[in-house]
């Protein structure tokens, strides 16, 4: 571990996802000429997880091996590999699983979210998730062992839709059943939703909307009303939950455990802590932001800008964000892009087919080029002060 001078300002960033890496790299570039600032990035793994592409990993497709320490070369950022086990917000310390203790002057909390496997009995025991590359790979290995059978995808949100389409395309010999309370593409406009339905039907996915899973067992899932659906493998994509670390530390959190922030992304209860990405309950004029990469990277950049301002004795500015689109892949050969208003409600404009595939692959490409630009040109990401709809960088971040 590096040593501090008495005047060192220690910034510790928890989580190296899209949001956390955006904070670390942008802040390092903004403070590179300051010897009194030490930035430490904590993450459980050295490999960056492309969560937007885990449905590809889950069907056995290989993604690029993106190494976080290699990305940080030349930035001066200290990388610490480990699980965060505790936060003492009063003492301003973080405990890592190997019993190390990190002290901070400013903390950026970006531990993100995982699939909520606690609400339905049996999910923890019998279902797979897309929480990590390891989880997705384990599911892919299960699919490869099936010569025939039924795969149930629990959850009809956009993650479930992408996963069901990918499985059906890559494993046409398996029957794929998409179960969920809501219709697939329910947040889209009529044209986008119809395209999702038609494509799932073309791929052979059997859609069961209005279905509530009440229990997952070894070979089937039970639905409300007593019906059961046979399942040789279950992939769970319904709902998310966040780490309990913030709540246990006494920070003010919402009813889902996300840190409640002020307009600048600082914790309302602890002013030395910024919350970003899925870990933050960020209020905008249209409501609380829901966790996506589209919003995650902008929160990370804004936190970097705010900390840099504080280090100069200035006040951070309010964060303003608007959504731009819902890009949804439907296998490798099809996609739908629903463009949205700032509040994430659908516009009339929809892209489908090859144009949508190109768009989705462009905006969902590995963020390494974006992070690389941040290392050299941190101000190229400073495009949020005026608020309004999402901008070109936010599109690239998605």
Image (spheres, rainbow, N blue to C red):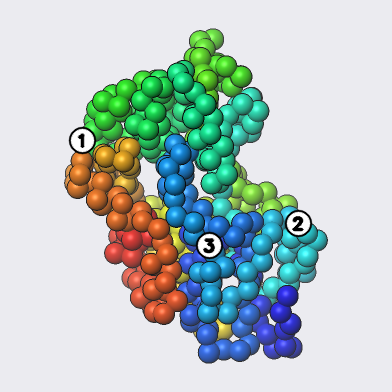
Residue reaching furthest to the top: 226
Which residue is drawn at the image coordinates 53% and 69% (left, top)? 70
The reply to whether dot 2 and dot 3 touch (C-beta < 8 Å) is no
Residue 67, labelled with which disc? 3
Residue 164 picture location, percent across and down: 40, 31
Residue 73, labelled with which disc? none
Q: Secondary structure at mark 1?
A: helix
Residue 364 picture location, percent across and down: 36, 53
Query: Which marked residue is nearer to the observer: mark 3 or mark 1?
Result: 3
Q: Quadrant of residue 114?
A: top right
In the picture of the structure, the residue carrying the numbered disc 2 is 97
Q: Secondary structure at mark 2?
A: loop
- The answer to whether one can see residue 304 in this image is no
Q: Mark 3 Cα within 10 Å, few/some/many (few <14, many 20+)?
A: few
Which residue is drawn at the image coordinates 26% and 46% (left, top)? 357
What is the CA distance from the residue labelled 3 to the residue labelled 1?
Answer: 40 Å
- The answer to whether one can see residue 220 in this image is yes
Closer to the camera in the image, 172 or 197: 172
Task: Please tell me which of labels 2 and 3 falls first in the chain.
Answer: 3
In the picture of the structure, the residue carrying the numbered disc 1 is 191
The reply to whether dot 3 and dot 1 touch (C-beta < 8 Å) is no
The C terminus appears in which quarter of the rendering? Answer: bottom left
Specify whether 393 is left or right of 303: left
Q: Quadrant of residue 284?
A: bottom left
Task: Please tell me which of labels 3 and 1 falls first in the chain.
Answer: 3
Which residue is drawn at the image coordinates 25% and 52% (left, top)? 359
Q: Secondary structure at mark 3?
A: loop
In the image, residue 181 above or below residue 322? above
Which residue is drawn at the image coordinates 43% and 42% (left, top)? 61
């Amino acid at each position: 571990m590096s040593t501090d001078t008495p005047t060192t300002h220690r910034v510790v960033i928890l989580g190296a996802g899209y949001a956390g890496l955006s904070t670390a790299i942008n802040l390092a570039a903004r403070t590179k000429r300051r010897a009194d600032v030490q930035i430490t990035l904590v993450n459980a793994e050295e490999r960056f997880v492309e969560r937007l592409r885990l449905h590809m990993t889950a069907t056995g497709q290989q993604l690029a091996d993106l190494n976080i320490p290699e990305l940080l070369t030349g930035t001066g950022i200290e990388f610490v590999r480990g699980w965060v086990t505790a936060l003492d917000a009063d003492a301003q310390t973080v405990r890592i699983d190997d019993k190390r203790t990190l002290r901070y002057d400013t903390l950026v909390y970006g531990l993100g979210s995982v699939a909520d496997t606690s609400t339905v009995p049996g999910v923890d025991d019998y279902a797979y998730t897309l929480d990590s590359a390891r989880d997705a790979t384990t599911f892919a290995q299960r699919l490869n062992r099936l010569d025939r059978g039924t795969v149930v995808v629990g959850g009809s949100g956009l993650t479930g839709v992408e996963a069901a389409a990918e499985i059906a395309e890559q494993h046409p010999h398996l029957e794929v059943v998409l179960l969920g309370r809501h219709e697939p593409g329910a947040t889209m406009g009529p044209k986008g939703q119809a395209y999702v339905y038609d494509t799932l039907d073309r791929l052979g996915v059997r859609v069961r909307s209005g279905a509530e899973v009440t229990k997952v067992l070894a070979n089937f899932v039970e639905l409300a009303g007593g019906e059961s659906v046979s399942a040789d493998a279950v992939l769970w994509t319904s709902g998310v939950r966040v780490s309990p670390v913030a709540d246990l530390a006494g920070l003010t959190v919402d009813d889902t455990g996300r840190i409640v922030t002020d307009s600048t992304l600082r914790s309302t209860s602890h002013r030395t802590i910024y919350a970003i990405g899925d870990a933050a309950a960020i209020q905008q004029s249209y409501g609380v932001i829901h966790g996506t990469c589209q919003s995650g990277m902008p929160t990370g950049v804004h936190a970097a800008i705010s900390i840099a301002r504080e280090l100069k004795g200035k006040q951070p500015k309010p964060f303003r964000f608007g959504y731009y689109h819902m890009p949804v892949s439907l296998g490798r050969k099809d996609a739908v892009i629903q463009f949205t208003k700032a509040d994430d409600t659908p516009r009339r404009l929809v892209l489908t087919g090859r144009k949508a595939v190109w768009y989705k692959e462009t905006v969902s490409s590995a963020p390494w080029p974006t992070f690389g630009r941040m290392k050299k040109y941190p101000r190229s990401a400073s495009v949020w002060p005026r608020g309004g709809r999402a901008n070109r960088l936010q599109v690239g971040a998605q």
